[in-house]
C-alpha cells in the first residue's frame, strides 16, 4: 500500500538517487508496507510455535523403538510397544471399505491443499491486475480447497477415532493383574494403533494445524466478501489478498512438514 | 538550531492539528490507539503489579526471616492461609514465591518495562506519528489487561494460585491432584500466560515494523538511539521465544485437562499408578527455557538501552562505542537462544552437552563486559549531572556488574551442580536481571516523566528514593550469596526443621527480611512522587535534560501525531554531546551539519550535500497516507 505511495510522491530522479540509501529512513526499506511486514513477522513467530510442537513430536517419537521385523515378527501388527508404520495406520479411503490403500487419502488431501495455494497465487496475481472478477473466482476456488481439506481431515480424524473392525488386543496391568482388552480406534488416552503418545501428538499437531487452516478459510471468506463488494477496488489496491495469501501459503508449508513427519517417515 | 526553534514556534497550533477530531473519554483514555496513552496504561498497570508482586515477597520474607513469628495480623489479607496458631500455610508459601516470580518477571519487568517504554519511545525517537498499527497496539494492551485480570483473580481461589514455581515444571503442575497449587490456580496461570503471549506478539510485531518502516527522513539504523536498538532487539527476542512457551503451555493444558501424556510418564501419586506413559518432563524444561532464557534478556535489554541514553545525556559525552554497543546487544540477543540448557545442568544431561552449553554461556560474558566497560568509559571524565535518572542508571551498571560476576560462577556446570537451586542463584538473578531491570524502569520513569506528563518529578525525593533503594537492594541480596554457598535451597518454607540449617544463618535471614521490608517501604516514596507529580509537579520545559533525541523536539505535551506540522528530519547521530567548537554542549539530531560549521569534523562536512537529498525524501507521514 504505502510502498506505492512512496514511489508516487518522490520525484523520479531522487528516487534513483535513493536506491542505494534504502535504509536511510523516510522510506519503506524493504518495499513492503507495514501490514505485509507484520504478516511476515507473525509468520516467523508462528514458525517457532510449530517448530516447538514438531520438536516435541521428534523427541517423543524417538524415545520409542521403531517396528523391527527381526524383533517383533515378520507381519506388522499394531502394538503399544513400538511406533507404528504410517502406511498401516493411514490406509483407508472413504467409500472403499476394507481396501488397503496406504496414504492415498492423505495424498489427495495434500494435493488439494497445495492446489489451493496455486489458486491463491492466481488470486494475488489477479489483484495486481486489479481484475475483480478473477480475484473473486480464484478466491472462491481457494476457499473451496480449504473447506475440502478441512472436511477430509474431519473424515480422517473420524476414521482414526473409530478404528478398525478388529481392534487391537492390549495387555495392561490393572491393580496388579494382567488384563487383556480389545480397544478400537484412538483418543487422547488410549490408542489401538500404537503408543497413546502417537495419538496424542497426531490429534494435537494436526488439530493445531487444522485450526490454522480454519482461520485461513475464515480470512479468505472475509477477503472474498470485501473484494466482491468492491472495497479493494475503491481502495485502489488488492494488498489484503496478498497478505492473507502469505498466511495461506505458510499454512500449506507447515502441512508439508506435518505430512512428512506423521505420514512419510 | 533553526529547526528546533521552528518546532517550538509551531507549538501554538498543536490543538489545530488536522487529525484532532475530538475523541470521547473512552476512546481517549481507555480504548486509546495512541502510543503515548497505551504506554501510560502499561506503566500504571506495571506499577500496580509491582506493588502486588513485592508485597508477596515481603510476606514470604517474614516467614523466612522470622519463622516463629505470629502472622495473625496478615489475616485480614490472607484469611485462612494464616492458621489458628498464626502460622503461614506452607502450601500458600509456595504460591507466594510462584506468584512473586510470575508477576515480577512477566507483568512488571516485561509488560511494565518494555510495554511502557517501547510504546512511548519508539515512535517519538524514530520520528513517527504513532505505532504502525494503533489498533493492534490497543489490542496488545487489552490482551495484557485480560491476562492481568485472570492472574489477579487466581490469587483469591480457595485452593490458592499456581504454586509450582514460576517455571511451572510438570509433573507437579500437570497433575491437579499433586498439590493445591496445581488445581484451578494452575489452570488460570496457563490461561493468563496464553493471553499474555498474544499480547506480546501483537506488541512485538508492531515495535519491529515501526522501527523498520516508519523512521523519519535521514534516520538510518546507524543514527538510531540505543534505546530504540534495544527495544527492537527485545521485540525480536520476544517474537521468537514466546511462541515456544505458547506451545509448551498448550501441551501442558492438554496434559492437565484432557488426559494426554506429553510430559508425563510412569508416575505414582498417593500410592496409585497413573496410566500416563511416554512423555518427558525434561521436554517441558527444554521448551520452557527456550523462552525462559531469552526472557532474561527481554527484561534486561530495554533497561540497558535506556541506561545508555541516560548515561550519555547526563555525562554530557557521546556514548563510548556506539557501534560496539549495538554489536554487543546483537551478540547477547543471538547467544540468548543457544544457552537455555544451562538452567538444566542437573537434569541428568549428558556432561558433554553440558560443557557445550557452559561454553556458550560463558561467551555471553564478552558482550556483557563490552557494555559494562562502555558505560564506565562514557562516565569517565564526563561532566556528570547526577539527576535521579542518572543515579538509577549508574546503580543499574553496578548491579549488572556485581550480579553478572556470579553469573560466571553459575555458568560453570561443575559449580552449578553445587549451587543449583540455592539462594546463591536467587541472589544472582535478582541482582543482574531483577534489580538491574527495575533500576532501568525507574531510571526511565524519572528521565521521561516530563515527556509523559509534561511535569517534573521531585528531585529530592528521587535522591532519597535512590539511596534507600540502592543500599536496601545490596543489603538484601549480598548476604544472600553466603546463605546460598552454605547450601540453603530456594523455595523452602522453613529452615528450622533441618539439622544442617537449624542453627546457622538464621540471624542473616532475619537481616535480609528486615532489609527487604525497608526497601519495600522506600518504594512508597517513589509512588507518592509519581502520583503527586502527575498532578502537582513543576511544569516541565521542552528539553529538561538538554538531550539530543527527537522526542524532545516534540511539544511538551505531544498531541495525537506527536509533532504539529512536519516530522523533523534527522541528520546526525544522537550523541553529539560536548562537541568541541559547538556553542552548546548538545546538538539535537534534527540540526543539519550545514548549520554547525564550527563543530563539524571533516567527514561530517562531506555529509552536507546529502542533507538536500534527505530533505527531498518522502516524509513517511502515516497521516498523509491512505489507510
Image: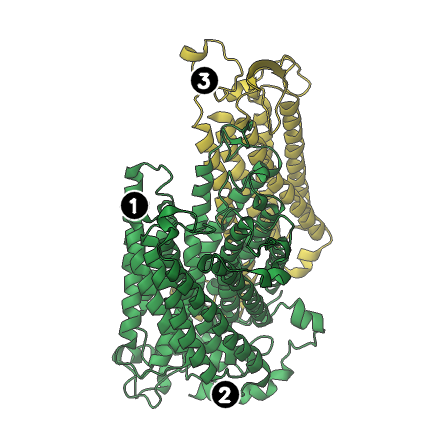
Colour of the chain lettered B:
green
* Position above or below: A116 against A155: below
Q: Which residue is mark 1?
A: B413
Chain of the residue displaying label 2? B
Image coordinates of residue A126 in percent, x first then y, are: 61, 48
Q: Nearer the viewer, residue B490 or A107?
A: B490
The residue carrying pointer 3 sits among few (fewer than 14), some (14 to 19) or many (20 or more) residues within 10 Å by Cα, namely: some
Chain of the residue displaying label 1? B
The residue carrying pointer 1 sits among few (fewer than 14), some (14 to 19) or many (20 or more) residues within 10 Å by Cα, namely: many
* Position above or below: A5 against A101: below
Q: Which residue is mark 2?
A: B541
* Mark pair 2, 1: CA separation: 53 Å
Image coordinates of residue B358 in percent, x first then y, are: 29, 47
Q: Earlier in the sequence, mark 2 or mark 1?
A: 1
The residue carrying pointer 2 sits among few (fewer than 14), some (14 to 19) or many (20 or more) residues within 10 Å by Cα, namely: some
Chain with colour yellow in the figure: A
Find numbered disc 2 in the image and state the secondary structure of the residue it sits on. loop
Location of the N terminus of chain A (image quadrant): bottom right
Chain of the residue displaying label 3? A
Q: Which residue is mark 3?
A: A67
Instruction: Give left or right: position of B342 versus B530.
Output: left
Find numbered disc 1 in the image and state the secondary structure of the residue it sits on. helix
Amino acid at each position: 500500500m504505502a510502498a506505492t505511495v512512496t514511489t508516487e510522491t518522490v520525484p523520479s530522479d531522487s528516487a534513483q538517487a535513493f536506491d542505494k540509501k534504502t535504509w536511510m529512513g523516510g522510506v519503506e526499506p524493504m518495499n513492503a508496507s507495514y501490514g505485509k511486514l507484520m504478516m511476515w513477522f507473525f509468520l516467523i513467530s508462528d514458525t517457532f510455535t510449530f517448530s516447538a510442537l514438531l520438536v516435541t513430536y521428534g523427541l517423543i517419537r524417538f524415545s520409542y523403538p521403531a517396528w523391527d521385523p527381526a524383533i517383533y515378527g515378520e507381519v506388522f501388527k499394531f502394538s503399544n510397544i513400538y511406533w507404528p508404520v504410517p502406511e498401516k495406520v493411514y490406509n483407508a479411503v472413504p467409500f472403499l471399505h476394507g481396501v488397503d490403500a496406504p496414504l492415498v487419502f492423505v495424498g489427495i488431501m495434500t494435493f488439494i491443499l497445495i492446489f489451493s495455494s496455486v489458486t491463491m497465487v492466481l488470486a494475488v496475481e489477479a489483484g495486481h491486475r486489479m481484475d475483480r472478477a478473477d480475484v473473486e473466482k480464484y478466491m472462491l476456488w481457494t476457499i473451496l480447497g480449504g473447506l475440502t481439506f478441512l472436511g477430509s481431515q474431519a473424515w480422517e480424524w473420524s476414521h482414526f477415532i473409530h478404528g478398525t473392525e478388529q481392534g487391537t488386543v492390549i495387555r495392561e496391568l490393572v491393580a496388579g493383574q494382567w488384563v487383556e482388552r480389545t480397544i478400537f480406534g484412538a483418543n487422547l488416552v488410549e490408542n489401538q494403533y500404537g503408543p497413546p503418545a502417537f495419538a496424542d501428538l497426531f490429534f494435537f499437531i494436526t488439530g493445531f494445524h487444522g485450526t490454522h487452516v480454519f482461520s485461513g478459510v475464515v480470512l479468505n471468506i472475509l477477503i472474498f466478501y470485501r473484494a466482491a463488494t468492491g472495497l479493494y477496488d475503491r481502495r485502489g489496491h488488492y494488498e489484503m489478498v496478498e497478505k492473507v495469501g502469505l498466511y495461506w501459503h505458510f499454512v500449506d508449508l507447515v502441512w508439508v512438514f506435518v505430512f512428512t513427519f506423521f505420514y512419510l517417515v | 538550531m533553526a529547526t528546533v526553534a521552528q518546532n517550538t514556534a509551531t507549538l501554538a497550533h498543536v490543538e489545530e492539528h488536522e487529525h484532532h477530531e475530538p475523541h470521547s473519554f473512552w476512546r481517549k483514555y481507555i480504548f486509546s490507539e495512541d502510543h503515548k496513552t497505551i504506554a501510560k496504561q502499561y506503566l500504571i498497570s506495571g506499577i500496580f503489579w509491582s506493588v502486588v508482586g513485592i508485597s508477596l515477597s515481603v510476606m514470604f520474607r517474614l516467614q523466612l526471616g522470622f519463622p516463629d513469628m505470629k502472622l495473625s495480623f496478615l489475616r485480614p489479607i490472607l484469611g485462612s492461609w494464616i492458621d489458628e496458631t498464626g502460622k503461614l500455610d506452607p502450601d500458600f508459601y509456595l504460591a507466594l514465591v510462584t506468584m512473586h516470580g510470575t508477576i515480577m518477571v512477566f507483568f512488571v519487568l516485561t509488560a511494565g518495562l518494555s510495554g511502557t517504554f517501547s510504546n512511548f519511545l519508539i515512535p517519538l525517537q524514530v520520528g513517527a506519528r504513532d505505532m504502525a498499527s494503533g489498533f493492534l497496539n490497543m489490542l496488545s494492551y487489552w490482551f495484557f489487561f485480560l491476562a492481568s485480570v485472570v492472574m489477579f483473580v487466581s490469587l483469591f481461589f480457595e485452593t490458592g494460585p499456581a504454586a509450582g514455581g514460576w517455571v511451572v515444571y510438570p509433573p507437579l503442575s500437570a497433575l491437579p491432584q499433586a498439590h493445591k497449587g496445581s488445581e484451578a490456580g494452575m489452570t488460570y496461570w496457563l490461561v493468563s500466560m496464553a493471553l499474555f503471549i498474544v499480547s506480546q506478539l501483537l506488541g512485538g510485531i508492531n515495535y519491529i515494523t515501526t522501527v523498520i518502516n516508519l523512521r523519519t527522513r535521514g534516520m538510518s539504523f546507524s543514527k538510531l538511539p540505543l534505546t530504540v536498538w534495544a527495544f527492537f532487539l527485545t521485540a525480536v527476542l520476544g517474537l521468537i521465544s514466546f511462541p515456544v512457551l505458547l506451545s509448551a503451555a498448550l501441551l501442558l493444558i492438554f496434559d492437565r485437562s484432557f488426559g494426554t501424556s506429553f510430559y508425563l510418564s510412569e508416575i505414582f501419586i498417593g500410592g496409585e499408578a497413573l496410566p500416563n506413559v511416554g512423555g518427558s518432563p525434561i521436554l517441558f524444561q527444554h521448551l520452557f527455557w527456550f523462552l525462559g532464557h531469552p526472557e532474561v534478556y527481554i527484561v534486561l535489554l530495554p533497561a540497558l538501552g535506556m541506561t545508555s541514553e541516560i548515561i550519555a545525556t547526563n555525562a554530557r559525552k557521546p556514548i563510548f562505542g556506539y557501534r560496539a554497543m549495538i554489536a554487543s546487544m546483537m551478540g547477547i540477543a543471538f547467544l540468548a537462544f543457544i544457552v537455555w540448557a544451562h538452567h538444566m545442568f542437573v537434569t541428568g544431561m549428558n556432561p558433554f552437552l553440558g560443557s557445550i552449553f557452559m561454553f556458550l554461556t560463558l561467551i555471553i560474558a564478552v558482550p556483557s563486559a563490552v557494555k559494562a566497560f562502555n558505560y564506565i568509559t562514557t562516565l569517565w571524565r564526563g561532566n556528570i549531572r547526577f539527576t535521579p535518572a542518572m543515579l538509577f542508571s549508574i546503580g543499574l551498571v553496578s548491579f549488572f556488574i556485581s550480579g553478572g560476576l556470579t553469573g560466571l560462577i553459575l555458568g560453570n556446570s561443575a559449580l552449578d551442580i553445587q549451587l543449583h537451586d540455592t539462594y546463591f542463584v536467587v541472589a544472582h538473578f535478582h541482582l543482574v536481571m531483577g534489580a538491574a531491570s527495575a533500576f532501568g524502569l525507574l531510571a526511565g520513569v524519572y528521565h521521561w516523566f516530563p515527556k509523559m506528563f509534561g511535569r517534573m518529578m521531585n528531585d529530592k525525593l528521587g535522591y532519597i528514593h535512590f539511596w534507600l533503594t540502592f543500599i536496601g537492594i545490596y543489603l538484601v541480596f549480598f548476604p544472600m550469596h553466603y546463605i546460598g554457598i552454605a547450601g540453603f535451597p530456594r523455595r523452602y518454607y522453613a529452615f528450622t526443621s533441618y539439622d544442617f540449617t537449624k542453627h546457622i544463618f538464621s540471624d542473616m535471614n532475619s537481616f535480609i527480611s528486615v532489609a527487604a521490608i525497608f526497601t519495600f517501604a522506600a518504594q512508597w516514596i517513589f509512588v507518592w512522587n509519581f502520583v503527586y507529580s502527575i498532578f502537582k509537579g513543576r511544569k516541565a520545559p521542552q528539553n529538561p535534560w538538554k538531550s539530543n533525541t527527537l522526542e524532545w523536539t516534540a511539544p511538551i505535551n505531544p498531541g495525537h501525531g506527536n509533532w504539529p506540522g512536519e516530522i523533523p528530519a534527522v541528520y546526525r547521530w544522537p550523541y553529539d554531546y560536548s562537541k568541541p567548537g559547538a556553542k552548546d554542549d548538545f546538538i539535537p539530531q534534527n540540526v543539519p551539519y550545514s548549520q554547525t560549521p564550527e563543530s563539524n569534523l571533516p567527514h561530517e562536512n562531506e555529509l552536507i550535500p546529502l542533507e538536500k537529498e534527505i530533505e527531498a525524501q518522502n516524509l513517511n507521514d502515516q497521516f498523509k497516507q491512505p489507510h
